[in-house]
Image (cartoon, rainbow, N blue to C red):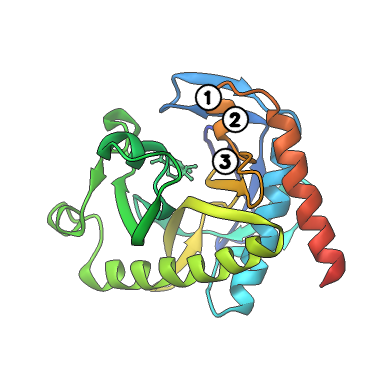
Amino acid sequence: MYEGKAKKVWATTDSSLVVVEYKDDATAFNGLKKGTISGKGVVNNLMSNHMFRLLSQNGIETHYAEELSDRETVVKKVQIVPLEVIIRNRAAGSMAKRLGLTEGSALKCTVLEFSYKDDSLGDPMINDYHALAMGISTKEEIAEISRMAFKINDVMKAYFKKLNVDLIDFKLEFGRFEGRIILADEISPDTCRFWDSDTGEKLDKDRFRRDMGGVEEAYAEMTRRLAEENEVM
Ligand code: C5P
């Protein structure tokens, strides 16, 4: 049906379901930087599905339906709300740069940010008034998306803490399904900043974006901690 930067989407015989295939292709800076992270698709599929199951146990409805293989998962077919919903627990990345803050500095409260999902515009940051004014979403949807994003942050922060990982920030996407807003897309080292709680070592896609080396190793380390925690559970 569709091939994106990091995933392919396949139709199924059931019109309410699609199959997502996670690729090893990696891009950054709106497609300007391209590369491959060997094994990334497997890590992202595994972590996303694990997080979706955990979130569902915590009352968050997600698009997850069934894991088919180490790279393929059946998900509910949603109409994506064209917003990148970003939660920030500490200042990093584009926020640190834009506002002149030290990478990793503490924030007095959690920050919720929206970007308009549009590659040709470079996903510009917008606020809820822009989203309403442009007809991107309704007031009710924005309230529901915001409520869910903060709840997801609570569940994820606590979970990753058990893996000795600080959840610095992350991006979510939501979709419309049978009149409801549900969590879609993925939750992975591509879409989150994960820092080791003791050393501050980056265990996410920033290693690729910033040419830091050890990219595959970082993804593998997150998988290792996830698997270890799974055995304990
Ligand atoms: O680059 P920035 O600091 O705005 O990114 C914030 C968070 O959102 C990071 O965790 C990053 O991985 C994620 N993100 C993403 N996809 C984008 C932009 C940001 O997953 N297109």
Dividing the image into 4 quarters, which one contains the N terminus? top right
> Badge 3 is on which residue?
190
Q: Looking at the image, do the residues carrying marks 2 and 1 touch, with CB atoms under 8 Å apart? A: yes
Residue kind at label 1, given as amino acid type:
Arg
Task: Locate residue 12, reporting x and y percent.
Answer: 64, 53
Residue density around tag 3, few if under 14, some if 14–19, many if 20 or more, within 10 Å: many
Residue kind at label 3, given as amino acid type:
Asp
Name which residue lies at 52% across and 27% down.
209
Q: Earlier in the sequence, mark 3 or mark 2?
A: 3
Task: Locate residue 126, reporting x and y percent.
Answer: 22, 48
State the residue in front, 66 or 215.
215
> For the residue labelled by badge 1, is the local secondary structure a helix, a strand or a loop?
loop
> Badge 1 is on which residue?
210
Label 3, ligand 1: CB separation under 8 Å: yes
> For the residue labelled by badge 2, is the local secondary structure a helix, a strand or a loop?
helix
> Badge 2 is on which residue?
207
Ligand 1 picture quarter: top left
* Quarter of the figure with residue 165: bottom right
Name which residue lies at 59% across and 39% down.
7
Horizontally, residue 81 falls left or right of residue 183, namely: left
Q: Looking at the image, do the residues carrying marks 3 and 1 touch, with CB atoms under 8 Å apart? A: no
State the residue in front, 111 or 142.
111
